[in-house]
Amino acid sequence: MDHRLATVGLISIIVGLGLCWTQSLNELSGSIDNPSASNSNVTDMRFNNTSRPEANASARNSAASASDILVYVNRPYGISMLYPESWSASTSALRDYTQLVAFYSPLENLSDGFPSKLTISTIKYKQNVSLSDYTDVALLTINQSQQIDIRNSSEVTLAGYPGYRVVVSSKPIQNSTLTVYKMDVLTSIGNKIYLVSYDGESNNFKEHLAEANRMIGSIRIGNK
């Protein structure tokens, strides 16, 4: 497999995390190092979380909560996803041709200058691409970078298909106070790679991680 082609989708990790943002990694809880902890399992995420007290509220409140959920549909690519009404969807200013849409978390106040972002991308090849081949080459590229650390990686399920998840963070850079975290979840279907990326400054990343995971868990591709 051509290494240059295999890293088209995940190369944005190195570019995005090469920004001059850093913060002590110890400030973040284990939920970032292990996104499968604390209501963030990619295979089980749903917006209707019955473990929360408010899930047992009246039918009227349940209906009101449902109205706060919007549906993103991309018919040409056969992709759909649920997302909170408080998030903003945009197809403008996408990083490259592989990205289909970006979703931005709400800003809490004037000091909250960097929203977290979730993007959906597809990469098409002439021949079928296996998930293992793609992730092996991508992880090799990440490991060769001097700017980022792999925090967590594991096999998951995306839209009912076998997938892979990797969480990375930028290394501390001198004279900077922020750190960027990024989580990529991907799957391979035939000759296409489907990649969902969630990134943000450390505090925002942690704050919206559960929402992002529920969004990823609601994704449907094709008939699944």
Image: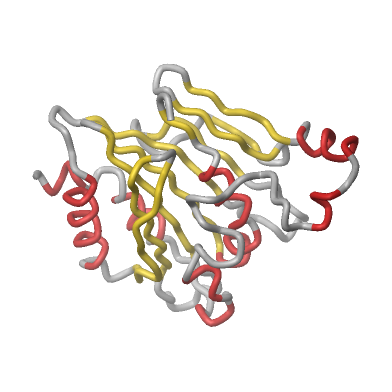
**Rendered location of residue 217, percent (x, y):** 52, 45
Residue 5 in the image: above or below residue 164: above
In the drawing, does residue 131 fall left or right of residue 70? Answer: left
**Rendered location of residue 109, percent (x, y):** 77, 55
Closer to the camera in the image, 202 or 211 = 211
Residue 146 in the image: above or below residue 137: below
Structure colour scheme: secondary structure
| Residue closest to the far top | 76
Which quadrant holds the N terminus?
Answer: top left
Q: Could you tell me which residue is drawn at 51 percent across and 44 percent down?
A: 216
Closer to the camera in the image, 63 or 4 = 63
**Rendered location of residue 18, percent (x, y):** 38, 61
Which quadrant holds the C terminus?
Answer: top left
Figure disc tally: 0
Q: Could you tell me which residue is drawn at 49 percent across and 77 percent down?
A: 175
In the drawing, does residue 187 fall left or right of residue 33? Answer: left
Which of the 4 image quadrants contains residue 153?
bottom left
Residue 215 in the image: above or below residue 52: above
Residue 193 in the image: above or below residue 10: above
| Residue closest to the far left | 1
In the drawing, does residue 83 fall left or right of residue 186? Answer: right
Q: Could you tell me which residue is drawn at 50 percent across and 37 percent down?
A: 219
**Rendered location of residue 168, percent (x, y):** 40, 64
Closer to the camera in the image, 5 or 132 = 132
Q: Could you tell me which residue is drawn at 42 percent across and 75 percent down?
A: 173
